Amino acid sequence: MEYNAWLKQSTKDFEVAKKNYLNKDYYVVAFFCQQAVEKALKALSIKKNKTILKIHDLVKLAREVQASLEIIEKCSKITPVYFEVRYPESDELPADKVNKREADELLLLSEEVIQWVKKNI
């Protein structure tokens, strides 16, 4: 498995998140932030452990790569959005679940986790 491909896709996903922020598609920002962090953590797992967990839980992935408590805490704030923005619940659309402030926080948290991964790869 090639960790570099996972890291490159993580970067692309984060770019998509930032572009959608400019379009005010904040739920897309949330989804791609989670995806970018997931792929970055999986890249580090491939590099360190020669394997990846086929899960979407960023906290478990962060623990798998021996991330600090600070990084794990950031992951715990990002993970829930993956599930929230995928499917409608009752009358609530995923597109209505994330506001600008939340998107701002997700971009910041995600960038911090991705930068940590890059320093540790």
Image (spheres, helix red, strand yellow):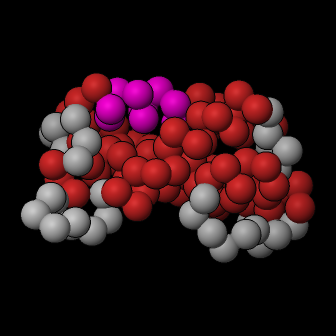
- On whether residue 104 falls in the magenta region, the answer is yes
Magenta stretch: give its range.
Answer: 102-110
Figure label count: 0
Which x, y percent locates residue 93? 15, 59
Left or right side of 57 for 15? left
In the rendered image, the vertical position of residue 55 relative to residue 43, given as above or below: below
Q: Residue placed at 16% from the left, 37% from the top?
A: 24
Which x, y percent locates residue 86? 32, 65
In the rendered image, the vertical position of residue 56 relative to residue 116, given as above or below: below
In the rendered image, the vertical position of residue 119 relative to residue 76, given as above or below: above
Q: Residue placed at 69% from the left, 34% from the top?
A: 71
The quarter of the picture where residue 89 lies is bottom left
- On whether residue 39 falls in the magenta region, the answer is no
In the rendered image, the vertical position of residue 98 relative to residue 52, given as above or below: above
Residue found farthest to the left: 91
Query: Which quadrant does the C terminus fall into?
Result: top right
Does the magenta stretch mainly form a helix, a strand or a loop?
A: helix
Q: Nearer the viewer, residue 105 or 91?
A: 91
Query: Which quadrant does the N terminus fall into?
Result: bottom right
Left or right side of 72 for 110? left
Which x, y percent locates residue 115? 64, 32
Q: Nearer the viewer, residue 40 or 109?
A: 109
Specify whether residue 6 is in view: yes
Q: Residue placed at 22% from the left, 35% from the top?
A: 99
Which x, y percent locates residue 46? 80, 62
